[in-house]
Amino acid sequence: MRSKIHNATVTEANLAYVGSITIDSDLLDAVGLWAGEKVLVVSNTSGSRLETYVIAGERGSGEICMNGAAAHLIGEGEEVIIMGFELTPEPITPHVILVDKANRLVRHLVEHPKREVASFL
């Protein structure tokens, strides 16, 4: 995981739009997500999970909009986690932010990947 927006609130679910998730550009910048990037969206409310791509939303709007078929799985008012990933041969330190109910950045969080060694009998 390279980027994560934690506890965002879906502000709109628009079935009529052609696929994707629209995210306030200020939030994209804060975690290093790009327009067109594939993301995993997980609903803390319903447990739904889906993959889609990012559309840059209006700066300062706080918008998190589920578009197209994704709006059937995750609706307005649900709390979500949005994650972007990167394939790399080296460990990376993810950019993680916590947002409030209006999707305003509250603080940066630090997550360190754990290295666990599996043991087999």
Image: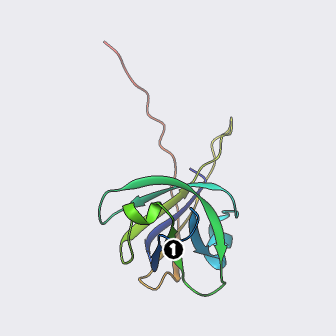
Q: Tell me residue 39's x, y (percent).
A: 56, 55
In terms of image quadrants, where is residue 101?
Answer: bottom left
Give the farthest residue toward the top: 121
Q: Tell me residue 118's x, y (percent).
A: 40, 25
Q: Tell me residue 92's x, y (percent).
A: 63, 48
Quadrant the C terminus occupies = top left
Tell me the element at label 1. strand
Which residue is drawn at the image coordinates 48% and 77% (left, top)?
99
Colouring method of the image? rainbow
Q: Residues within 10 Å of mark 1 (few under 14, many from 20)?
A: many
Which three-letter amino acid code belongs to the residue tagged 1?
Cys
Q: Tell me residue 44's x, y (percent).
A: 33, 63
Residue linked to disc 1: 65
| Number of numbered discs | 1
* Nearer-the-camera pick, 103 or 58: 58
Which residue is drawn at the image coordinates 68% and 72% (left, top)?
29
* Nearer-the-camera pick, 70 or 57: 70
Q: Residue 45 vs residue 114: left or right?
A: left
Which residue is drawn at the image coordinates 30% and 66% (left, top)?
45
* Nearer-the-camera pick, 83 or 109: 83
